[in-house]
Structures are given as C-alpha cells and as structure tokens.
C-alpha cells in the first residue's frame, strides 16, 4: 500500500496542489471533522496573542481566511499569506491577502506585531527556516500563536483520536470526492516533531517565554 505522504522533494508541490483542490469546501469539512471545535480553537489562539487592538498580525498559511476573520473580529489588522492560489481565491475575508511562501516571506523585517499559523506546521518543508522567518519579520516584543494537532496523553483519548482522524476522516474525504487529501491530512501529523523539539527550534530562532497549551483532551 502506498503512503499518503509525499517524498520530501515532492512535498511542497503536492501539498500546494492538494490545497488548491480542496479549497472550495475546506471550511465546511473542517467544521464536520472537528465537530465545530475549530471555532473554539481559533478563538483561544487569537486570545493567546495578548496584543493591543490595531496590532498588525501576519496569519501564515491563512487558507480561506477563517483565522483572519477571527483576528479582525478581535480588533486586529491581519494580513493573510498562503502559497495556495486556490485557497486565496476561495477566501472569505476583507483582510489583505498575499500569495507567498512562509519560508521566504515577502514581508520586510521587523514590520508586524504578531504571527498566527493554524494547522500548517506539518506542511512546511522545514521548521527551522520557518521560525527564523517569523523572528525576522516580528517587531521587538512581538508575539506568536501557533495552532496544530497533537497526540493526547490519555490512552483512551489517543485511541479515539486515532479511530476518528485516521480511519473515519479519510472515509469522509472519500465521500466528498477527495480521498487522497483526507488521507494526507491525518497522516501528515507524522511530520511534526515532539512538542518539546518544536519549542526548542523556536527558542533557537530567538523566541522566549514560550508556553504550550493543550485543548480537547490534548488532541490540539
């Protein structure tokens, strides 16, 4: 059986093409497969920034703009960046959007107050250059809030998470017409290092006072 994960040299192109394909129904499917919890996760992410209203926030891998909308509702001035033209074409936000690579941001140094990124760390081809770019574009005192899946500590929660995201979600994807994409999305969590390793990479890029918070029994 072939792996749903692309080879390293194919990853960027295949992931971009996949998100282009699933963009029209992306938010709707996210609602279903998270049982509506994605709204609460984004709300917690926005609050974690703890920045004053009017702050300029760079939302990386912004997709169809759901986190940009939440940032706007909180009084921030978001700028969305995504490498998928399909996602940007289907975005439902009035925030400015830019097509670009999170590892080579088309943003001048020290120009944004905060950075958010939802469910995308596993899609990048390297986390060290990602964190380095985030550090470059942030103003002194800037803050970041990243939202990504995790492995629950409880054996029961891990079992339920495994059944849902690795077995049932791909079936939902197949029913909606893109089995390949919804096999990749759960399987791609294998790209993520352990949380402490991710924090260590961020610290190496210059970030301080990092805190990890879990939600939904540790699944996020």
Image (spheres, rainbow, N blue to C red):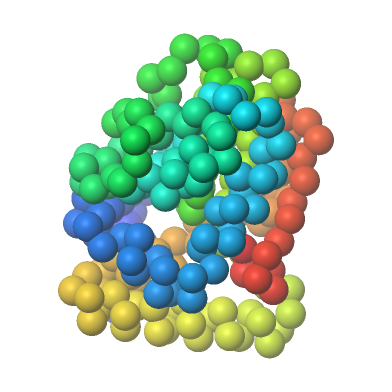
Q: Is residue 125 left or right of residue 220?
A: left
Q: In front here: 6 or 70?
A: 70
Q: In front here: 3 or 180?
A: 180
Whole-percent x and y of residue 211? 77, 46
Picture layout, residue 201 above or below residue 211: above
- The count of marks equals 0
Q: Is residue 110 left or right of residue 103?
A: right
Please identify the quadrant where the C terminus is shown: bottom right
Q: Is residue 138 left or right of residue 34?
A: right
Can see residue 126? no
Picture layout, residue 177 above or below residue 127: below
Q: Residue at x 43, y 18 (%)?
A: 107
Picture layout, residue 218 above or below residue 22: below
Whole-percent x and y of residue 102? 43, 32
Q: Is residue 88 left or right of residue 162?
A: left
Q: Residue at x 54, y 14 (%)?
A: 111
Q: Residue at x 55, y 32 (%)?
A: 76
Can see residue 213? yes
Q: In front here: 13 or 142?
A: 142
Residue 9 picture quarter = top left
Whole-percent x and y of residue 16? 27, 47
Whole-percent x and y of residue 176? 22, 75
Please identify the quadrant where the N terminus is shown: bottom left
Q: Residue furthest right?
A: 209
Picture layout, residue 100 above or below residue 44: above
Residue 177 picture quarter = bottom left
Q: Residue at x 31, y 80 (%)?
A: 172
């Amino acid at each position: 059986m072939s792996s749903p994960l692309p080879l390293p040299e194919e990853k960027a192109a295949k992931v971009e093409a996949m998100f282009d394909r699933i963009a029209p129904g992306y938010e709707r499917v996210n609602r279903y497969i998270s049982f509506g919890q994605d709204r609460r996760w984004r709300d917690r992410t926005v609050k974690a920034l703890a920045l004053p209203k009017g702050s300029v926030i760079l939302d990386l891998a912004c997709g169809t703009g759901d986190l940009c909308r939440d940032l706007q509702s909180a009084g921030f001035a978001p700028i969305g960046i995504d490498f998928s033209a399909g996602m940007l074409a289907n975005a439902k936000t009035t925030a400015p959007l830019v097509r670009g690579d999170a590892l080579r941001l088309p943003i001048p140094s020290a120009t944004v107050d905060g950075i958010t990124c939802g469910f995308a760390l596993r899609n990048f081809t390297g986390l060290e250059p990602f964190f380095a770019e985030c550090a470059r574009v942030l103003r002194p005192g800037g803050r970041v809030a990243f939202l990504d899946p995790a492995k629950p500590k409880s054996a029961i929660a891990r079992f339920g998470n495994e059944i849902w995201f690795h077995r049932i979600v791909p079936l939902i994807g197949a029913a909606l017409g893109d089995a390949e994409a919804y096999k990749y999305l759960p399987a791609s969590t294998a790209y993520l290092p352990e949380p402490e390793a991710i924090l260590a990479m961020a610290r190496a890029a210059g970030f301080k006072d990092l805190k990890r918070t879990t939600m939904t029994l540790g699944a996020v």
